[in-house]
Image (cartoon, helix red, strand yellow):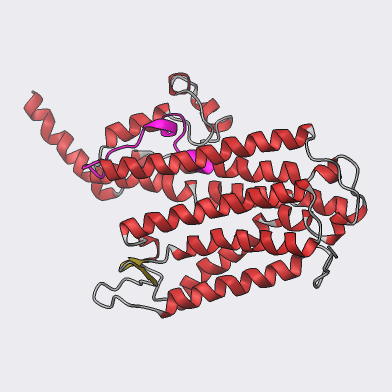
Amino acid sequence: MAVIHVLDDYYLAITLLITIAYQLFFFSIAFSLKFDKLTGKLHTLTISRTPIDPGNLDFAGGTNFIVLAIITLALSGHNHARQIVVSLFIMLWGARLSGFLLFRIIKTGKDDRFDDKRDNFFKFLGFWVFQMLWVWIVSLPVTVLNSPAVTQYPQPAFGTGRDIAGVILYAIGFIMESVSDIQKYRFKVQQSDKGAVCDKGFFSWTRHPNYFGEIIIQFAIFMIAVSPAADGYVRGQAYKALYSTILGAIFLTVLLMFVSGLTLQERPGAKKRYEKGNHWEEYASWLHRTSILIPFPPQLYAPLPTIIKRTVFLEFPIYVFDPAKHASDVKRSREAEEGATAEPSAA
C-alpha cells in the first residue's frame, strides 16, 4: 500500500485537527441538549431510557484514541508488526476505558463532576479543550511510529527484549487498571454503607491501582514504539521525534499525580471523611498501611519511616491530610468543645 502524506510527515497536524473536531462535536451535544430541566442536570444521551450525564466526556476521550490509531495506521500504508501491536494496544486501552465509563454512568445515571460547570459555556468547554490535549499528546507514540517520517526506514523485527518488556508491562498495567475498576464498582454496588472503605483486592496494596496501571500502560507503549530508534534503524529528526514521544507518558503521569488525579482525591477526600465523621478511623488506618500509588504489601508499608513514604513511595506532602492544619475551623472548634466537656466527666 502507498504511504499517504497529510499536512506533515509526522501526522501531527492531521491528528490534532481530527481530535479538535471530534471533541468539539461531543462538546456541542453535551452543552446543547439539556433534557432534564427539573433537576438542573444535563443529560446528553439516552440509551434504553437511561439518562447519560457528561461522562460522555470520558467516552469521547477513550474512543478518540481508537480513531487516531486507526487513521494513522491506515494512512501509513505499512503493516509492520510493531505498528500493529502498538496501535492495537492503545485501541484496546481506549475501548476498555470508554466502555467501562459508559457502563458505569448508565448504571449510576449521572456524573456529578460537572454539576457546577455544565451551564457555564467557557468552564465546561475548558474540560473538553484539556481533553483534546490529553488525547493528542498521549497518542504521540502511536502517531509518530505510524508516520511516513519513521516508516520510510527499515524496521527491526518485532520481538526484541524491549518489545517483550513492553508487552509484559502493558499486560500488568491493563490487568491492574481493568480489575481494579471492576473491584471498586462491585464493592460500591454490594455495600449498603456507601461510606465504607474499599480495601479489597488491589486496593489493599495501593490506594490507586487504576492510576498505576494506566501510567505503566503508557510507558509500555512508548517502550515498544521507540524500538526503531533505540535499535539504530531510524535516524535524523525521526530518531529525535520517536524519543520525544515519551512526552505522552510523562504528560499522563503529571496529569494523574498533580492535576486531576491524586491532588483532587487524596487530601480533599480525607478532609471530607474527617469532617463528616464518615468512617474516619478506618479510613486513616487504610491510609497509613497502604501505598498511595506503587503497589506494596501493607504489612511492609505500614511500619516504614515517613521519609521513605514521602520520597520512594511518592506520598508527597501535598497529598497528606493533617486535621490540625487542614480541617475546617468549625470542626476543630466542635472537637475542642467536646474535649472540654469530657474532662469534667472523666474527673
Determine the main secondary structure of the stretch shown in magenta: loop
Up/down of 66 relative to 299, above or below? below
Q: Nearer the viewer, residue 321 or 73?
A: 73
Name the image quarter holding the N terminus.
bottom right
Up/down of 302 relative to 315, above or below? above
Q: Is residue 100 magenta?
A: no
Q: Position of residue 290 (x, y in %)?
A: 43, 29
Q: Position of residue 163 (x, y in %)?
A: 75, 37
Q: Residue at x 50, y 56 (%)?
A: 98
Image quarter for residue 172? top right
Name the image quarter holding the C terminus.
top left
Stretch in magenta: 191-211
Q: Residue at x 90, y 45 (%)?
A: 233
Q: Position of residue 278 (x, y in %)?
A: 25, 42
Number of dots carrying numbers: 0
In the shown orientation, is residue 92 left or right of residue 262?
right
Q: Is residue 196 magenta?
A: yes
Q: Nearer the viewer, residue 235 or 129?
A: 235
Q: Position of residue 267 (x, y in %)?
A: 41, 44
In the shown orientation, is residue 130 left or right of residue 185?
right
Q: Residue at x 77, y 57 (%)?
A: 146
In the shown orientation, is residue 256 left or right of residue 149?
left
Image quarter for residue 51? bottom left
